[in-house]
Image (cartoon, rainbow, N blue to C red):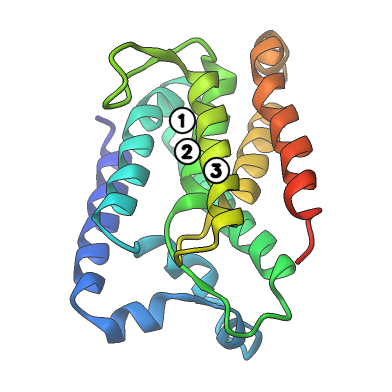
């Protein structure tokens, strides 16, 4: 595993576990509309290092582990880091725009960042075989991306947790677009596969909440 990927996963796991038992730390890192609008913009990034529960943390880190190494191999460690944090910021920015008038809205998780890596990675190798427990067979990366997206849209509609599901969409769009622009030839070769999750992102996203709240 590339050292930068390992370091990112370890830091996120350690901070998340610390926040599980420390409400004060969790409160300081949380994506909080009211506090962000009051000037605490650092929360746009710190919220990506804490998670709602073990399942939320494992889901995000497992997806990052699955796609991170391949992403770095196809690009570079620097590009990986850039896309990760661009996705984290873009996901939270979309959330801020959609929920700007809901001052009680709070969220947490690396959803946007992981989505950026997932959708960027799909451009590099859309047919990469992915194992997802408990599914007994491998599935192509572009199908995993679509499942990831549908899970996010369900989470937005259900609205029964503090997970930053909306950030999945912003992160996915940022990762997809930035990778496509940076690797145009690769993007065009993968277009027949990536067009499916990209179209689903646009159609289902608009259908569910019209990019406004």
Q: Residues within 10 Å of mark 3 (few under 14, many from 20)?
A: many
Q: Nearer the viewer, residue 188 or 158?
A: 158
Q: Residues within 10 Å of mark 1 (few under 14, many from 20)?
A: few
Q: Earlier in the sequence, mark 3 or mark 1?
A: 1
Q: Is residue 96 above or below residue 27?
A: above
If the image is split into quadrants, where does the N terminus sit?
A: top left
Marks 3/1: CA–CA distance: 11 Å
Check disc 2 and report its element: helix, strand or loop.
helix
Marks 3/2: CA–CA distance: 5 Å
Check disc 3 and report its element: helix, strand or loop.
helix
Q: Position of residue 47 (x, y in %)?
A: 44, 68
Marks 1/2: CA–CA distance: 6 Å
| Residue under numbered circle 2 | 80
Tag 3 near tag 2, CB within 8 Å: yes
* Residue 183 visible to the viewer: no
Q: Is residue 34 above or below residue 3?
A: below
Q: Nearer the viewer, residue 79 or 31?
A: 31
Residue occupying image coordinates x 46% and y 44%: 114
Labelled disc at residue 99: none
Q: Position of residue 182 (x, y in %)?
A: 67, 29
Q: Position of residue 132 (x, y in %)?
A: 32, 25
Check disc 1 and report its element: helix, strand or loop.
loop
Q: Is residue 191 above or below residue 166?
A: above
| Residue under numbered circle 3 | 83
| Residue under numbered circle 1 | 76
State left or right for residue 9 relative to residue 187.
Answer: left
Q: Residues within 10 Å of mark 2 (few under 14, many from 20)?
A: many
Tag 1 near tag 2, CB within 8 Å: yes
Q: Nearer the viewer, residue 166 or 119?
A: 166
Q: Nearer the viewer, residue 204 or 6?
A: 204
């Amino acid at each position: 595993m590339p050292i930068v990927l390992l370091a990112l996963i370890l830091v996120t796991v350690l901070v998340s576990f610390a926040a599980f038992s420390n409400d004060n730390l969790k409160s300081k890192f949380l994506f909080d509309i009211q506090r962000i609008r009051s000037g605490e913009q650092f929360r746009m990034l710190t919220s990506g290092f804490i998670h709602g529960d073990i399942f939320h943390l494992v889901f995000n880190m497992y997806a990052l582990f699955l796609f991170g190494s391949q992403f770095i191999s196809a690009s570079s460690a620097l590009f990986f880091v850039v896309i990760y944090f661009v996705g984290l910021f873009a996901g939270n920015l979309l959330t801020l725009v959609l929920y700007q008038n809901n001052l009680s809205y709070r969220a947490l998780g690396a959803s946007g960042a992981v989505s950026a890596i997932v959708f960027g990675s799909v451009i590099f190798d859309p047919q990469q075989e992915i194992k997802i427990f408990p599914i007994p067979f491998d599935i192509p990366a572009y199908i995993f991306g679509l499942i990831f997206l549908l899970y996010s849209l369900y989470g937005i509609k259900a609205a029964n947790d503090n997970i930053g599901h909306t950030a999945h969409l912003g992160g996915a769009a940022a990762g997809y677009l930035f990778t496509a622009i940076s690797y145009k030839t690769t993007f065009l070769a993968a277009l027949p596969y990536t067009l499916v999750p990209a179209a689903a992102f646009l159609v289902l996203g608009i259908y569910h909440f019209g990019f406004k709240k």
